[in-house]
Image: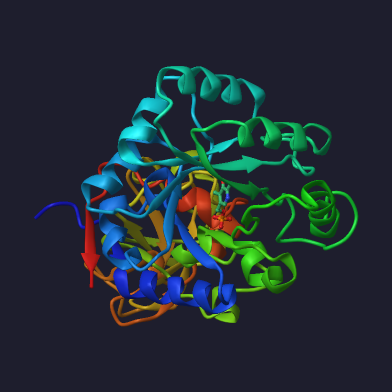
Amino acid sequence: MSRPIQAVVHLDALRHNLQIARQYAGDSQVYAVVKANAYGHGIERVYPAFQSADGFALLDLAEALRLRQLGWQGDILLLEGIFCLEDLFVCQQHCLSFSIHSAHQIDWLQQFQRQHPEARFHVYLKMNSGMNRLGFTPATYRDAFAQLQALEIIASITHMMHFSDADGERFGAPGIDYQQQCFEQTIAGLPGKRSLCNSAALLRHAPALHSDVMRSGIMLYGSSPDFPQHTIQDWNLKPSMSLRSEIIAVQQLKAGESIGYGSSFVAEKSMRIGVVAWGYADGYQRISPSGTPVLVNSQRSQTLGRVSMDMLAVDLSHLPDADIGAEVVLWGYSSSGAILPVDEVSQAAGTVGYELMCAITARVPFVVQA
Ligand SMILES: *Cc1c(COP(=O)(O)O)cnc(C)c1O
């Protein structure tokens, strides 16, 4: 038998979460963000659940072409835009939309138009409204818009921005009110659709933001964008990924005995310990401390000691029936339906659900559950 590890992708949960995004989006379009190989799930695996999305957003050309190979004919938005002039040939050939966030990209479009005046592109003009990552500042935005508008090859321009604090307070710089105001003032009077919302903005603020195109990512994958203020249960989202393994050895520790590298966990009393086939080489964060939650036989327990490359240890003291072969869930659903949200695990590890899901390594076998 092969090592008993498995990542399960739940299509019904992905469908359900997209439906929740639609509820919050009202009449606006909902794009499914599938960057980073669909947040670690695999683009090919999630695609059947997302075919009713209005578009897809990602940033690798190769991932965009994989969507085209799957048969997707609708819009695909490249969130980081084009990285060189040659990318425009690929965008033209495969009808890809892209963001324009810097002046050098407008130069490339001007060059491209001289050679290919017949090309037509739908672009998203990105404003830097306070996050200071990508985009034109309010002072340069309207000029960039005018330059694009003057190009024959530009078929439409959508106004785009990204919130740095959509999961946090509304006020103060760069709270969302500040960024929204900056955006509204800058585009006042300009024609074009608008794309503002990530998951946090969509769930928390969508009606006030007038976003025609929502870019929903993390919520589709069953992680709450503003955990711990709201859990996935609060937002009625479902885990879309379950990591499952088994107990492959049991140890009985006496008081004073330790477990794992560095002997970082020392038993204060006699304890029953399960060793689980799952380690940091499978993508579990080594930084996860003792006490990180897990499910054993659908019941809550916790990790003990350091995570090793291929193994980690869990407490079985309160689970006398859990023996060799007992199911261990690192996050997601147990096979009998108990839930351990990825957000609780990421909180223990001092990170976010995004990072955990993206970190699953190539040696972990995936299965897709309808
Ligand atoms: C990743 C990304 C999103 C999606 O964000 P979530 O928090 O996962 O919903 C939206 N817009 C841009 C520009 C992004 O890079």
User: Does residue 187 appear left or right of residue 263 in this picture?
Assistant: right
Does residue 6 appear in this view? no
The image shows residue 264, relative to residue 49, as above or below, that is above
Residue 247 sits in which quadrant? Answer: bottom left
Image quarter (top left, top right, bottom left or bottom right) of the N terminus: bottom left
**Residue at position x 30%, y 69% in the image:** 11
The image shows residue 138, relative to residue 339, as above or below, that is above
Residue 276 sits in which quadrant? Answer: bottom left
Image quarter (top left, top right, bottom left or bottom right) of the C terminus: bottom left
User: Does residue 234 appear left or right of residue 363 in this picture?
Assistant: right
275 and 57: which one is in front?
57
75 and 296: which one is in front?
75
**Residue at position x 40%, y 23% in the image:** 116
339 and 60: which one is in front?
60
Q: Report the residue that reaches farthest toward the right.
A: 172
The image shows residue 355, relative to residue 219, as above or below, that is above
Does residue 70 appear in this view? yes
Q: Position of residue 16 (x, y in %)?
A: 41, 77
Q: Report the residue that reaches farthest toward the left.
A: 1
Tell how many labels: 0
Q: Position of residue 286 (x, y in %)?
A: 48, 44
Q: Position of residue 187 (x, y in %)?
A: 77, 49
201 and 265: which one is in front?
201
The colour style of the image is rainbow
Q: Position of residue 167 (x, y in %)?
A: 71, 61
**Residue at position x 52%, y 25% in the image:** 109
